[in-house]
Image (tube, rainbow, N blue to C red):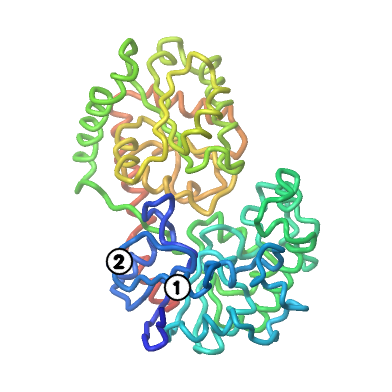
Amino acid sequence: MDLSNKRYETIFVSTQDHYGGSDNHGLFQIFKYFKNTLKKDCAFICTQESFMDYEDLYDLSKLGGNLPLSKQINSILYNKNNPNSWQDFSTFSLESENTKNIDNLLNHFPKHKNIILGDKFDINEILLSKILKRFDSKLILIAMVNNAHTGLCSYPTEHMCDKYKFEQGCYNCPENRNRNAKDINQQTYANHYDNFSLDMFMLHKQFLEKHSDIVTLVACSDYSIQQANESFLYKDIKKILIPLKNAEPTVSNGQDLVDLRKETKKQMIENHLQKTFPNKKIENICYWSAFDPFMYRKGIRYFIDVLYLLKNKYLSNKEWETTLFLISGIPQQAKAAMSHAPQDAMLALTGFAKRNVVTNILLSSDVYCCTTIEDAGPRTIGEATVCGTPIVSFDRCVAKNLVSNKNGRLIKTYDCDSMAKGIAEIIRLDKKQKENMVFESIKSYDLFYDDEKIIKSWKTIL
């Protein structure tokens, strides 16, 4: 598809527009916010595949021929199975000559003032630099993951690594070592060669030295912006916090939400859960979710520790026996992981739940448990807050912006004992205390996701 005759104020570029077949894709959510709330002239361009049917959404994957365009323009520098990869370059420099892959995209791109990426991996800096020059555009890099300020490691604290903070860069990358140890044939950027992360760090350093005046890093949480401020690469680059708003209140006020939660929980238990557990009395629901429960960063092993602590230390026998634990995520992984939970735990696996299902689960839940050990989001924290669901979460994520003792518990990462204690405390709250947590959740949501402030922030950088 040739878009060279089109003109937009802002274009979003990503490999795809979906997440597991739904539109719950962070950058696509921001694109829709631009279209529907900001009323901006913008387009969303996919380089690998597209599932959604939306105005100004384009799929350029076929420009790559038999190989999706994404595989030819991203940061995969060496892949012996990909003859169109960046291995053509003898040196990784912004001054490298154009290749067929570069011209292929430059000649089909729409004219634009701003280009927005949610992952710097999606377009290699060599090409990105040429895009900015060709179209005289500005780059807005949204930290959907925290790899902007590293050598493409998305979550450095997960590996207890702080090399991104220093000029020497990301040498001997622990993420590369971990991935290589798991599968030496895995076709991801981690396995292309030993110095990949260091080269990516230095290439991005070169890129920022050239384009620092036209680059803005947008972080979606205080945790991400704090980490970016500590980065050697981004210490002098303009940064701004703009929440990723992907949920809206389902009712107009707190009391209506209290009533909706009560009715939704009743229907969830009677129509679904009680049929699965006919001989059980369900009084409390605790929810945990991750698209892929095996993802190390999501911390399901800590959630299992929390279950044992709840059973053996913090809940009475009656409380334990009447508390249902709902788990969402890829079924095979969720089932395998939860086989390590206490054998008498009342567990229900939902599989991969679409947004409307997640909303109903959150409205029905007495507590949402988040054990992520590092995250730019997760967006489910915001979704839980707008549903009035008390949250017990580790603190290396957006929970720092949304959770307090008024509407949940913010727990120091890895402290499973305090997390279990926090869940038990919320389960034991009386009716009035639980209602107050609903009201406080709405206050927290309205304060952080205030449209007026978000719109003002976007106007500032556009």
The answer to whether mark 2 and mark 1 are in CB contact below 8 A is no
Picture disc at residue 77 = none
Q: Is residue 146 above or below residue 258?
A: below
The percent coordinates of residue 69 (x first, y second) are 53, 71
Report the amino acid beneath label 2. Answer: Tyr
Q: Earlier in the sequence, mark 2 or mark 1?
A: 2
Q: How many marks?
A: 2
| Front position in the image: 240 or 433 | 240
Picture disc at residue 54 = 2
SS class, disc 1: loop
Quadrant assignment, res 81: bottom right
Q: Quadrant of the C terminus?
A: bottom left
Residue depicted at x 39% and y 33%: 350
Left or right of 387? Residue 197 is right
Is there any visible trace of residue 20 in the rendered image? yes
Left or right of 448? Residue 82 is right
The percent coordinates of residue 72 (x first, y second) are 59, 71
| Front position in the image: 348 or 139 | 348
Disc 2 or disc 1, which is closer to the eye? 1
Q: Is residue 170 above or below residue 332?
A: below
Left or right of 341? Residue 246 is left
The percent coordinates of residue 137 (x first, y second) are 49, 85
Spot the residue most to the front: 66
Q: Quadrant of the N terminus?
A: bottom left
Q: Which residue is mark 1?
A: 60
Report the amino acid beneath label 1. Answer: Leu
Q: Is residue 214 above or below residue 414?
A: below
Q: Is residue 29 above or below residue 239?
A: above
**Dot 1: within a 10 Å radius of its alpha carbon, few (fewer than 14), some, or many (20 or more) residues?**
many
Is there any visible trace of residue 409 in the rendered image? no
The percent coordinates of residue 348 (x first, y second) are 41, 25
**Dot 2: within a 10 Å radius of its alpha carbon, few (fewer than 14), some, or many (20 or more) residues?**
few
